[in-house]
Amino acid sequence: MTTPIIILIILALPLAIGWLLKQFSKASGPLQIAHCASIGLGLCFIFFAIGHLLKTQGMIEMLPQWIPYRSLIIYATGVLELLIGLALFMPKLRVPAAKLAVLVFVVFFPANIYAALQGVGLGGHQWGAIYLLIRAPLQLILIAWAYFLCIKKPPHQTPTH
């Protein structure tokens, strides 16, 4: 059950570090919220990609048996997550990557539902349907983070080019 906590720490840590640095430095101007938030989301996607590429069998079990090419799907989605993660570090690709991240969160969520209902022993899914009480809000947090902090420009922030 530690995976959701790890995800939240990875997500929020760059923003917290940015805020702390801003508080204790003499730099002028507002905190670059979208920049820090995108780094956190990018790190999360790299974490997700590592899970797909290193815990492949567990990820395969998250998909129903009737889906063909399950291992190929897991590897391909791991590469996709890695690319999204890296793109979130690049200012010119940040917004399109965050939009793609939201799409991925929505499209991949049924696999999390299936895994929880099947009790797949990976990342908390072994808890069964009760895990969805944690996973669904986490999914909403990730989507809201991507939209409000990475796509939509937060107020009082200068745009990055």
Image: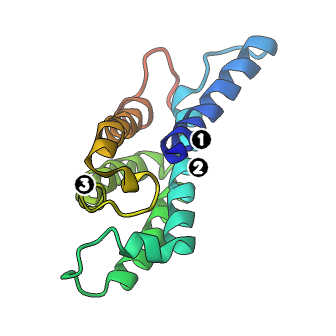
**What residue lies at 53% left-to-right and 73% top-to-bottom?**
53
Give the residue displayed 39% in from the left and 56% down from the top. 126
Residue 132: x and y in percent read 29, 44
Please give the residue where the numbered disc 2 appears in the rendered image: 43
Question: Looking at numbered disc 1 in the image, what kind of residue is underneath it?
Answer: Ile
| SS at circle 2 | helix
On the image, the x and y values in percent for residue 81 come to 46, 62
Q: Quadrant of residue 95?
A: top left
What is the spatial separation of the Cα atoms under label 1 and label 3, in whole angstroms?
23 Å
In front of the other: label 3 or label 2? 3
| Distance between mark 2 and mark 1 Cα atoms | 7 Å
The x, y position of residue 57, in whole percent, is 46, 77
Between discs 3 and 2, the one toward the N terminus: 2
Q: Which residue is mark 3?
A: 113
Q: Nearer the viewer, residue 34 or 11?
A: 11
Using residue 161 as the reference point, say whether residue 114 is left or right of it. left
The answer to whether residue 52 is left or right of residue 106 is: right
Given contact means CB atoms under 8 Å apart, are the residues at marks 2 and 1 in contact?
yes
Q: Please, what secondary structure does the residue beneath circle 1 have? A: helix
Can you see residue 114?
Answer: yes
Q: Amino acid at mark 3?
A: Ile
Residue 106: % across, % down: 25, 51
Tell me the SS state at disc 3: helix
**Label for residue 149?**
none
Who's the residue at 23% across and 74% down the image? 64
Label whose residue precedes the other's in the sequence (2 or 1)? 1
Quick check: 65 left or right of 15?
Answer: left
* Residue topped by disc 1: 10
Question: What amino acid type should be assigned to the residue bearing mark 2?
Answer: Leu
